[in-house]
Amino acid sequence: MRGGALTADTIERCTKADFDQVVAEHGAFWDSDLTLPLHHPIFIFEFGDSAFVIRDGEKVTAYLQGFRSQVERVGYVHMVAVRSGYRRLGLARRLYEHFVDQCKRHRCTGIKATASPKNEASIRFHTAFGMTMIGDGEVDGVPVVRGYLKPGIDRVVFRMAIDCGTGFQPVNR
Ligand SMILES: CC(C)(COP(=O)(O)OP(=O)(O)OC[C@H]1O[C@@H](n2cnc3c(N)ncnc32)[C@H](O)[C@@H]1OP(=O)(O)O)[C@@H](O)C(=O)NCCC(=O)NCCS
Protein backbone atom coordinates (compact mmCIF):
# COMPACT_ATOMS: atom_id res chain seq x y z
CA MET A 1 0.00 0.00 0.00
CA ARG A 2 1.36 3.42 -0.84
CA GLY A 3 1.11 6.98 0.37
CA GLY A 4 -2.08 8.28 1.91
CA ALA A 5 -3.40 4.77 2.47
CA LEU A 6 -0.72 4.10 5.06
CA THR A 7 -1.94 4.52 8.60
CA ALA A 8 -0.25 4.69 12.00
CA ASP A 9 -1.50 1.11 12.49
CA THR A 10 1.06 -0.04 9.98
CA ILE A 11 3.93 0.94 12.29
CA GLU A 12 5.28 -2.19 13.93
CA ARG A 13 8.27 -3.27 15.91
CA CYS A 14 11.28 -4.08 13.79
CA THR A 15 11.96 -7.80 13.62
CA LYS A 16 15.36 -9.37 13.02
CA ALA A 17 14.15 -10.28 9.50
CA ASP A 18 13.31 -6.60 8.89
CA PHE A 19 16.73 -5.61 10.20
CA ASP A 20 18.45 -8.16 7.93
CA GLN A 21 16.47 -6.88 4.95
CA VAL A 22 17.48 -3.27 5.69
CA VAL A 23 21.15 -4.24 5.96
CA ALA A 24 21.01 -6.34 2.77
CA GLU A 25 19.27 -3.51 0.88
CA HIS A 26 21.09 -0.64 2.58
CA GLY A 27 21.67 1.15 -0.73
CA ALA A 28 17.91 1.52 -1.21
CA PHE A 29 17.75 3.64 1.93
CA TRP A 30 21.07 5.48 2.00
CA ASP A 31 23.26 7.23 -0.56
CA SER A 32 26.50 5.80 0.80
CA ASP A 33 27.83 2.83 2.77
CA LEU A 34 29.05 5.06 5.60
CA THR A 35 26.02 4.33 7.78
CA LEU A 36 26.11 0.56 7.24
CA PRO A 37 28.39 -0.15 10.25
CA LEU A 38 26.01 1.86 12.43
CA HIS A 39 23.34 -0.79 11.86
CA HIS A 40 23.87 -3.09 14.82
CA PRO A 41 21.49 -5.78 16.10
CA ILE A 42 21.57 -4.26 19.60
CA PHE A 43 18.92 -1.89 18.26
CA ILE A 44 16.64 -4.91 17.79
CA PHE A 45 17.73 -7.24 20.56
CA GLU A 46 18.47 -4.74 23.35
CA PHE A 47 16.58 -1.57 22.31
CA GLY A 48 13.89 -3.35 20.31
CA ASP A 49 10.89 -1.71 21.94
CA SER A 50 11.87 1.53 20.19
CA ALA A 51 12.82 0.11 16.79
CA PHE A 52 9.97 0.48 14.33
CA VAL A 53 9.23 -0.24 10.69
CA ILE A 54 6.61 0.53 8.10
CA ARG A 55 6.20 -2.16 5.46
CA ASP A 56 4.64 -2.42 2.04
CA GLY A 57 3.80 -6.12 2.01
CA GLU A 58 7.03 -7.85 3.00
CA LYS A 59 9.12 -4.87 1.95
CA VAL A 60 10.39 -2.51 4.64
CA THR A 61 9.71 0.99 3.36
CA ALA A 62 10.85 3.01 6.39
CA TYR A 63 12.48 2.35 9.73
CA LEU A 64 13.49 4.13 12.91
CA GLN A 65 15.90 2.82 15.52
CA GLY A 66 16.00 4.66 18.80
CA PHE A 67 16.36 4.31 22.55
CA ARG A 68 15.77 6.23 25.73
CA SER A 69 18.82 7.82 27.26
CA GLN A 70 20.14 6.63 30.62
CA VAL A 71 21.58 10.04 31.51
CA GLU A 72 18.64 12.33 30.77
CA ARG A 73 14.92 11.96 30.10
CA VAL A 74 15.40 12.06 26.37
CA GLY A 75 14.59 9.72 23.50
CA TYR A 76 17.43 9.46 21.00
CA VAL A 77 16.84 8.57 17.37
CA HIS A 78 19.87 6.64 16.23
CA MET A 79 18.66 6.01 12.70
CA VAL A 80 15.75 6.94 10.48
CA ALA A 81 15.55 6.13 6.79
CA VAL A 82 12.93 5.79 4.10
CA ARG A 83 13.32 3.61 1.03
CA SER A 84 13.93 5.52 -2.19
CA GLY A 85 10.59 5.75 -4.01
CA TYR A 86 8.67 6.09 -0.74
CA ARG A 87 10.02 9.48 0.33
CA ARG A 88 7.97 12.64 0.89
CA LEU A 89 4.94 10.53 1.81
CA GLY A 90 5.16 11.39 5.49
CA LEU A 91 6.62 8.02 6.53
CA ALA A 92 9.54 9.44 8.53
CA ARG A 93 7.19 11.91 10.19
CA ARG A 94 4.85 9.06 11.19
CA LEU A 95 7.73 7.11 12.67
CA TYR A 96 8.91 10.16 14.62
CA GLU A 97 5.40 10.86 15.91
CA HIS A 98 5.15 7.24 17.03
CA PHE A 99 8.51 7.48 18.79
CA VAL A 100 7.55 10.78 20.48
CA ASP A 101 4.29 9.23 21.73
CA GLN A 102 6.24 6.37 23.23
CA CYS A 103 8.78 8.75 24.78
CA LYS A 104 5.94 10.70 26.38
CA ARG A 105 4.56 7.50 27.90
CA HIS A 106 8.00 6.93 29.39
CA ARG A 107 8.00 10.48 30.79
CA CYS A 108 10.73 11.82 28.53
CA THR A 109 10.96 15.60 28.30
CA GLY A 110 12.68 15.73 24.93
CA ILE A 111 14.00 13.97 21.88
CA LYS A 112 17.39 14.22 20.23
CA ALA A 113 18.93 13.21 16.91
CA THR A 114 22.13 13.96 15.01
CA ALA A 115 23.09 14.28 11.36
CA SER A 116 25.96 15.13 9.10
CA PRO A 117 26.00 18.85 8.22
CA LYS A 118 26.00 17.72 4.57
CA ASN A 119 22.75 15.77 4.89
CA GLU A 120 20.36 18.40 3.61
CA ALA A 121 17.31 16.10 3.47
CA SER A 122 17.83 15.14 7.11
CA ILE A 123 18.25 18.77 8.18
CA ARG A 124 15.11 19.73 6.27
CA PHE A 125 13.15 16.85 7.72
CA HIS A 126 14.18 17.41 11.33
CA THR A 127 13.63 21.16 11.25
CA ALA A 128 10.24 20.64 9.54
CA PHE A 129 9.38 18.28 12.40
CA GLY A 130 10.06 21.15 14.79
CA MET A 131 13.49 20.24 16.08
CA THR A 132 16.09 22.89 16.82
CA MET A 133 19.71 22.69 15.77
CA ILE A 134 22.01 23.46 18.65
CA GLY A 135 25.74 24.03 18.50
CA ASP A 136 28.87 25.99 19.06
CA GLY A 137 29.89 26.40 15.44
CA GLU A 138 28.66 26.55 11.86
CA VAL A 139 29.36 24.67 8.63
CA ASP A 140 28.05 26.36 5.48
CA GLY A 141 25.56 28.26 7.62
CA VAL A 142 24.36 25.13 9.44
CA PRO A 143 24.77 25.10 13.25
CA VAL A 144 26.99 22.24 14.42
CA VAL A 145 28.49 20.89 17.60
CA ARG A 146 32.20 20.97 16.88
CA GLY A 147 34.03 17.67 17.31
CA TYR A 148 30.81 15.89 18.35
CA LEU A 149 31.67 12.63 16.57
CA LYS A 150 35.41 12.85 17.11
CA PRO A 151 38.01 15.61 16.94
CA GLY A 152 37.55 17.42 13.65
CA ILE A 153 34.23 15.73 12.82
CA ASP A 154 31.25 17.96 13.58
CA ARG A 155 27.62 16.96 13.82
CA VAL A 156 24.31 18.71 13.59
CA VAL A 157 22.54 18.05 16.89
CA PHE A 158 18.75 18.34 16.90
CA ARG A 159 16.76 18.78 20.07
CA MET A 160 13.08 19.17 20.76
CA ALA A 161 11.25 19.48 24.05
CA ILE A 162 8.16 17.32 24.45
CA ASP A 163 5.44 17.63 27.04
CA CYS A 164 4.99 14.32 28.81
CA GLY A 165 2.38 15.86 31.10
CA THR A 166 4.34 15.37 34.31
CA GLY A 167 6.01 18.73 34.75
CA PHE A 168 7.26 20.19 31.54
CA GLN A 169 11.03 20.66 31.47
CA PRO A 170 12.31 22.11 28.22
CA VAL A 171 15.54 20.57 26.98
CA ASN A 172 17.98 23.30 26.05
CA ARG A 173 21.39 21.72 25.60
C1 LIG B 1 15.43 12.27 5.67
C2 LIG B 1 14.37 11.22 5.35
C3 LIG B 1 14.36 10.16 6.47
C4 LIG B 1 12.99 11.90 5.29
O1 LIG B 1 12.00 10.90 5.12
P1 LIG B 1 10.59 11.18 4.40
O2 LIG B 1 9.66 10.09 4.74
O3 LIG B 1 10.83 11.46 2.96
O4 LIG B 1 10.13 12.53 5.12
P2 LIG B 1 8.61 13.02 5.29
O5 LIG B 1 7.83 12.67 4.07
O6 LIG B 1 8.07 12.53 6.59
O7 LIG B 1 8.82 14.59 5.34
C5 LIG B 1 8.20 15.43 6.29
C6 LIG B 1 8.61 16.85 5.95
O8 LIG B 1 10.04 17.00 6.09
C7 LIG B 1 10.54 17.87 5.06
N1 LIG B 1 11.41 17.12 4.15
C8 LIG B 1 11.63 15.77 4.15
N2 LIG B 1 12.54 15.45 3.19
C9 LIG B 1 12.86 16.59 2.57
C10 LIG B 1 13.73 16.90 1.49
N3 LIG B 1 14.46 15.95 0.86
N4 LIG B 1 13.86 18.20 1.10
C11 LIG B 1 13.15 19.16 1.72
N5 LIG B 1 12.29 18.94 2.75
C12 LIG B 1 12.15 17.66 3.17
C13 LIG B 1 9.31 18.40 4.33
O9 LIG B 1 8.87 19.57 5.01
C14 LIG B 1 8.32 17.26 4.53
O10 LIG B 1 6.98 17.67 4.42
P3 LIG B 1 6.33 17.81 2.94
O11 LIG B 1 6.70 16.60 2.16
O12 LIG B 1 4.85 17.90 3.24
O13 LIG B 1 6.89 19.07 2.35
C15 LIG B 1 14.62 10.55 3.96
O14 LIG B 1 14.93 11.55 3.02
C16 LIG B 1 15.76 9.52 3.96
O15 LIG B 1 15.56 8.36 4.27
N6 LIG B 1 17.00 9.95 3.60
C17 LIG B 1 18.15 9.01 3.57
C18 LIG B 1 18.52 8.53 4.95
C19 LIG B 1 18.87 9.70 5.87
O16 LIG B 1 19.62 10.61 5.51
N7 LIG B 1 18.30 9.66 7.11
C20 LIG B 1 18.49 10.70 8.11
C21 LIG B 1 19.75 10.46 8.85
S1 LIG B 1 20.04 11.60 10.16
Image: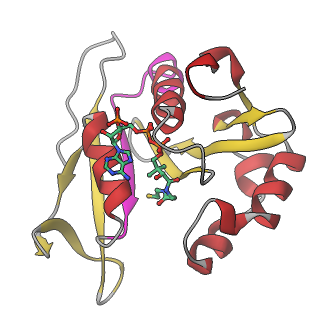
Instruction: Give the mark count.
Output: 0
Residue 2 x, y percent position in the rendering: 65, 29
Image quarter (top left, top right, bottom left or bottom right) of the N terminus: top right
Q: Quadrant of residue 73 in the image?
A: top left
The chosen color scheme is secondary structure
Residue stretch in magenta:
102-116
Q: Quadrant of residue 40 in the image?
A: bottom right
Q: Is residue 130 left or right of residue 139?
A: right
Residue 168 x, y percent position in the rendering: 23, 18
Query: In the image, is residue 112 part of the stretch drawn in magenta?
Result: yes
Outermost residue to the bottom:
152
Residue at left offset 22%, top offset 38%: 171
Vertically, is 78 above or below 120? above
Residue at left offset 13%, top offset 76%: 140
Residue at left offset 36%, top offset 70%: 116
Residue at left offset 42%, top offset 47%: 71
Identify which residue, 103 or 10, lies in the foreground.
10
Residue 143 x, y percent position in the rendering: 15, 64
Identify which residue, 4 or 99, lies in the foreground.
4
Q: Is residue 130 left or right of residue 110?
A: left
Query: In the image, is residue 59 part of the stretch drawn in magenta?
Result: no
Identify which residue, 1 or 98, lies in the foreground.
1
Vertically, is 108 above or below 74? above
Q: Quadrant of residue 21 in the image?
A: bottom right
Residue 44 x, y percent position in the rendering: 76, 47
Vertically, is 40 above or below 33? above
Q: Is residue 19 left or right of residue 37?
A: right
